[in-house]
Amino acid sequence: MKNSIFNLSDSIGLYLHKDYNNLSRTSTPINYRLISLNPSSVVVYSQSEGYPVRPIERKTIEKMKKSKKFKGNLSDTSKRKVQSIANNLFSSILSFNSNCNIIGESSSNYLSFATLTLSATQYHSDEEIKRNLLNDFLIQIKRKFQVEHYIWIAESQKNGNIHFHLILDRYINWKSFRNLWNKIQSKYLYIDLFELKNGHRNPNSTDIKAIKFINMLGAYLTKYVSKDSKYRKIIGRLWSCSRKLRFLKALTVHVTDITDKLSDHLHRNNKVYRFYDDYFAYFSLDVLPILKKLDVLLYNKYILHNIYNYSYLYDNIKYCPKPSCILSGNEKRKKSAKYIYDYLGIYS
């Protein structure tokens, strides 16, 4: 029998509520179920409408400010944010790359993992390393290699040095990547200190790999985001990302929007990892091929949502598949958006 998280009685009640659009925030709460679709997981959770809005007291604000102090390890909330941002970035690029042929375009955006390490014993503070070396490096890769979006995570090594893990929206040649980081290190004498000890000025201070499959992204996030550092705590900010990535959202649909075939697959297939809780259900699987096989309409919505995310990230307005693109704007913009809709079967 299906888990109670898929009980639809209260969910359907939301849509049957005649005055839902005028529902007061102080009226009786209505519970309903939503499904969030990520590249490697499906999450089903409850949400309520109608709870009264209470003013935030001064003590609560002060408590929130204190809780935001950096504690040297990523909090569970921060880990979830990083994972969500990385998944949304991967989904948008993957969806556009796999469908860009329908509008006669090609994409040069492919995710990559990268690592930056110091080539000698760290003698600057963590804040100085991030402010001077890391920030300079991010500015340079934007200018020289057209990197637009990135995520970085700071971590300590066994030798006490700070180092950085990055997710970038482009692959950069490993040699060019290393030369740039070493050039920045040389400004702060790390290459000189390395040469005194090793007799040359070309340390192996970086690593970069292309992300070709979703399981590679999952493995990376598990290894570098989910764990806490074994060594010293990092001072200051532990992670950050480019501004637009913070606003990306995964596709969320009502539980009644999925087919029975997909629901049965989530609950009964032995290859799907499941975790049930009182408030949510988590399913780990490769989402895209399953959607394409078992729920074509939801698959189309998923692709459409992520192409829109891509258009937002890279300012490709003509690829933006919002309904407003068809109803307004110039003819070229309307034609491109309408073409995407027709191809995905959203409009006939």
Image: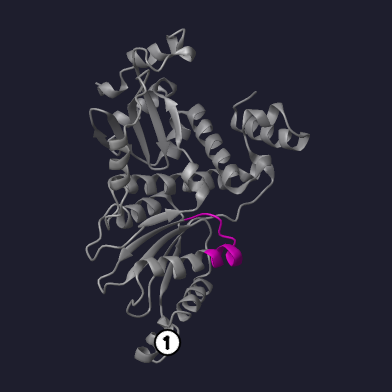
The quadrant of the rendering that contains the N terminus is top left
Which of the two residues, 272 or 254, is positioned nearer the viewer here? 254
Which residue occupies 40% across, 18% down?
A: 25
On screen, residue 24 versus residue 297, left or right, reads: left
Residue stretch in magenta: 139-150
Residue identified by numbered label 1:
192
Which residue occupies 38% across, 85% down?
A: 194
Choose top left, top right, bottom left or bottom right for residue 281.
top left
- Indicate the position of residue 122 as horizontal and vertical percent values: 33, 76
Compared with 21, 342 (above or below) is below
Compared with 161, 302 (above or below) is above
Residue 256 magenta-drawn?
no
- Indicate the position of residue 304 as horizontal and vertical percent values: 56, 35
**Amino acid on which the number 1 mark rests in the picture:** Asp
On screen, residue 219 versus residue 1, left or right, reads: right
The quadrant of the rendering that contains the C terminus is top right
Asked if residue 268 can be seen in this view, the reply is no
Asked if residue 104 can be seen in this view, the reply is yes
Which of the two residues, 212 or 320, is positioned nearer the viewer here? 320
